[in-house]
Amino acid sequence: MEKVSQNNNLLESKQKLVRAGGLILFIGACGLCVARIVSYFLSMYAFTSVDIVTAEMTLDVIFTLMVQVLFLLGAPFIVYKLYLKGKTSKFLSVSNVRPVSVKVCLIAILVGVLAPVMSMLINYIVNVVFLSIGIALPSSTIILPENFNFGVLLLNILLTAILPGICEEIFNRGIVLSGLRSVFSDWVVILLGGLVFGLFHQYIFQTFYTAAFGMVLVYISLKTKSILPAMIIHFTNNFVAVIGDFATFYGCEFFSIQNLLAKVNNVIALIALLIVGVALFGLAVYLLIKVHKYDSNKKLINNLIKEGKFPEEVAKSKHVNVAGVTVLGGPLGDVVYYKPTLKDTILYWGAFAVALFTTLVTLFAQMIR
């Protein structure tokens, strides 16, 4: 009888987690649309009397703060407080932000440095596909002050690397990821998590490589049972992009991976280099997972030895393998699934519809140009 009661409580908590994830996604999808509309009208009517650099920087600050802080970070926190009724002190833990070893953090930086190469390869393939159907990818325009300004660089790092690395990870791989993991197996969660990450950029030409990047981040989060490595990877990836943009604009192309690869005139050689880069990226991800597993097992074994619950000679065995522990507020290590009802998933479908619609609008806008 007690076991039945425990199972019912577990399923009830999973249901709340699933519904919380859907609510967060729906608020985020609608919030992104609102931010884009506000940004559009501000660009049309509010900053017509200032120079283009000041206008673009101001709009970027307003848009980024609205999206990242208000919606992507604010939505999970509000849902956590008002719907899940959790304690503020536990928000990060419930959002799957948990410590990992220094070695894992360092490898995460390496993964983040190599991640742009994967994006370039996917972008190259997508570009070829779109060109084959008569759609050209828009060229990106970098708008910066004529003379280098260190403060502007720091501002761009904050808006493009630090805030997305924190806010987007908490939004995509916090309660939302835990909700998905309560329903689906790891591989389904990886696919769905990547799709959500890609569509929530709401820009068709970013959807594909961000979806692939999102899948990798979900995989790492599930394996490490923490989004801290994903935060570091996300930050590093975006940081490299910011440095590359500044290097390109101010003529220091040596510091831009994209510009260095662009100098390769032979298409086959370029693709080969990209494939090698992606292989190194995959190897770094594999190394991160293996190091984390080793560190986690070693830490758990040492704790058991201190408590006198684990024979010391077993700790020396090369075959010791301790299973993952279910995490508080986010069952990234749990294999008990909850079967959702239509009411549980309606907000997921709503968020998906909003994100897909806005993404397709960007495609149609490019087609009619």
Image (tube, grey):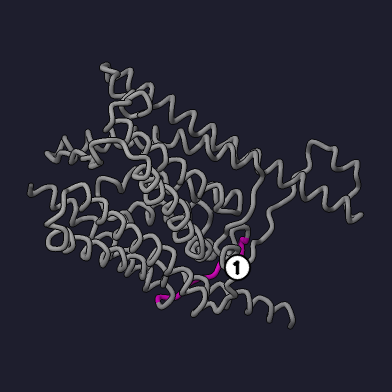
Residue picked out by circle 1 = 329
First to last magenta residue range? 334-342
- Residue 337 drawn above or below residue 212: below
Residue 101 placement: quadrant? top right
Residue drawn at 47 percent across, 29 percent down: 279
Amino acid residing under circle 1:
Gly
Which residue in the rendered view is the most extreme toward the left? 368
Residue at image location 58% in from the left, 37% down from the top: 107
What is the tally of numbered marks visible in this picture? 1
Given residues 345 and 169, the one toward you in this image is 169
| Residue 61 x %, y % | 31, 56
Q: Position of residue 96 (x, y in %)?
A: 57, 59
Residue 349 percent location from the top left of the image: 34, 68
Q: Position of residue 58 (x, y in %)?
A: 26, 55
In the drawing, does residue 165 fall left or right of residue 108?
Answer: left
Please tell me which residue is depicted at 56% across the width and 72% down the height of the picture: 14
Q: Quadrant of the N terminus?
A: bottom right
Taking the magenta stretch, the answer to whether it contains residue 9 is no
Name the dominant secondary structure of the magenta segment: loop
Q: Nearer the viewer, residue 125 or 27?
A: 27
Residue 337: say if magenta: yes
Query: How many neighbours does mark 1 have within 10 angstroms: few (below 14), some (14-19), or many (20 or more)?
Result: many
The answer to whether residue 6 is above or below residue 256 is: below
Q: Is residue 268 left or right of residue 191?
A: left
Mark 1: secondary structure:
loop
Q: Is residue 76 above or below residue 205?
A: below
x 62%, y 74%: residue: 10
